[in-house]
Image (cartoon, grey):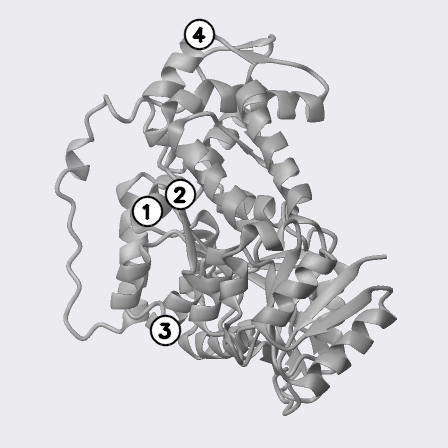
Amino acid sequence: MGHALIVEDDLDSARMMAALVTTEGYTAATAQSLRDARRQLALQPPDLVLLDLRLPDGSGMALLDDQALIGNSEVVLMTGHASLETSIQALRYGAADYLIKPVSARQLQAILSRVMKPSVLQAEVEGLLDEVQRIGRFGHMAGRSGQMKLVYEQIARVAGTSVTVFITGESGTGKELVARTVHDLSRRRGRPFLAVNCGAISANLIESEIFGHEQGSFAGAERQHQGFFERASGGTLFLDEITEMPPAVQVKLLRVLESGTCMRVGSTTPIETDVRVIAATNRDPAQAVAAGALREDLMYRLNVFPIELPPLRQRREDLPLLVSHFLREIGTREGSAKHASPKALARLAEYSWPGNVRELRNALQRAYVMTTGSEIGDSWLPRNQLAEPLPRRERGSQLQIDVGTPLAAAERQLILATLEHFGNHKERTAAALGVSLKTLYNRLKEYGI
């Protein structure tokens, strides 16, 4: 049985929360001021502290400054609204989560269901950091380079909190793997992790897919549909390629992040959400805002804790480790072990990798299939794009688009011209355009190619 301390100056609210906490098997104590809270903490260290930010004798944050008193208690902030400032404060002080007042029974039950002592999470993180030194693995990722160790440190810092994470990096660098590792190290690990590629869903359907819809809300809506926010309840929702989300849907996402509620399409009844959002993009967020692809207010709301992933060409020292990892994975699946020769590793180290780690995995899969023996040579690996000169027709290639050309038509011309420029090499085309391979395939499908 755990013990909870409720620090809330409104006596009726404190008693209500204490009653809810006890129905979940906890003992509960209440405090109406900082002074009273310090006394209660000294009397019986709690497993959970529900802490109001505004108290008669000061800010609730003052209590978090005394780490010796808080000890190994999990702290959940209580606030009137989920503002950007609240998220930043929660991160700064190491709070596990925050509740929006008035606190509902459902919100409180969700918090209680994932109470975990900070020391337990810290021990898990330390175990993963030890694995980096031993086998070069951290959660779902591999690499020992300085750039990747910095990424691991950031994940370790943010995973135990509830704040939103914004992952940036070129296509194929492993943004979803970062999101999955954050989820697996969080208190939400026992609940769903849903990954949504915003560029892979039709603009006409994305609102319904994310927020759900009511029966009859539009043509074809034959039954009620739960959106990703409802299906990921209690867990993590990963929104990849967030800059591909239509502006109107971005507005509704911002409202969900600020209010903690969403509404299905065709409904007027708000639904409480209990989801951690992690977003990602392969574009520079500031440039995406300037181009009108990302709302500025949404960027600030998502970008509470940014993590930038380095491209593969900037961490070439990780190549032998990644090659070994992928070939072992392929060999286990195919039932036959193969390894890369020194010549193969040298070829791989020279290549520019526009498609990053995803392209490396695909290249090794192809080489594995084409190699008859146990040692993979350099015959079936990508050519050294850094060394070979571009064909004459590729130098200085330009595309002329008339002023007034519709945006969709201009985009089509640019994509097709870039594809031709790179000799129908889709990964290089996607990398040059700054979009994911999946987005490129979706566009080509729209064009009937």
Q: Quadrant of residue 69?
A: bottom right
Q: Mark 3 and mark 2 in contact (Cβ < 8 Å)?
A: no
Q: Which is nearer the N-term, disc 4 or disc 3?
A: 3
User: How crowded is the residue under tag 1: few (<14 C-alpha within 10 Å), some, or many (20+)?
Assistant: many
User: How crowded is the residue under tag 3: few (<14 C-alpha within 10 Å), some, or many (20+)?
Assistant: few
Q: Which is nearer the N-term, disc 1 or disc 2?
A: 1
Distance from disc 2 to disc 4, alpha carbons, whole Å, reads 28 Å
Q: Which mark is residue 297?
A: 3
SS at mark 4 in the image: helix
Q: Mark 4 and mark 2 in contact (Cβ < 8 Å)?
A: no
Question: Which residue corresponds to mark 1?
Answer: 419
Q: Which is nearer the N-term, disc 2 or disc 4?
A: 4
Q: Which is nearer the N-term, disc 4 or disc 1?
A: 4
Which of the two discs, 4 and 3, sits closer to the camera?
3
Q: Quadrant of residue 344?
A: top left
Question: Which residue corresponds to mark 4?
Answer: 342
What residue is rendered at 45% in x and 39% in y?
A: 151
Left or right placement of residue 115 versus residue 99 in this view: right
Q: Quadrant of the C terminus?
A: bottom left
Q: Quadrant of residue 429?
A: top left
Front-most of residues 43 and 160: 43
Q: Where 86 sits versus 344, above or below?
A: below
Q: Which mark is residue 426?
A: 2
Front-most of residues 125 and 255: 125
Residue 367 screen position, x and y as percent: 52, 21
Front-most of residues 295 and 400: 295
Q: Which amino acid, by three-letter code, is at mark 2? A: Lys
Left or right placement of residue 51 versus residue 142 in this view: right
Residue 297 screen position, x and y as percent: 36, 73
Distance from disc 2 to disc 3, alpha carbons, whole Å, reads 33 Å
Q: Which amino acid, by three-letter code, is at mark 3? A: Asp
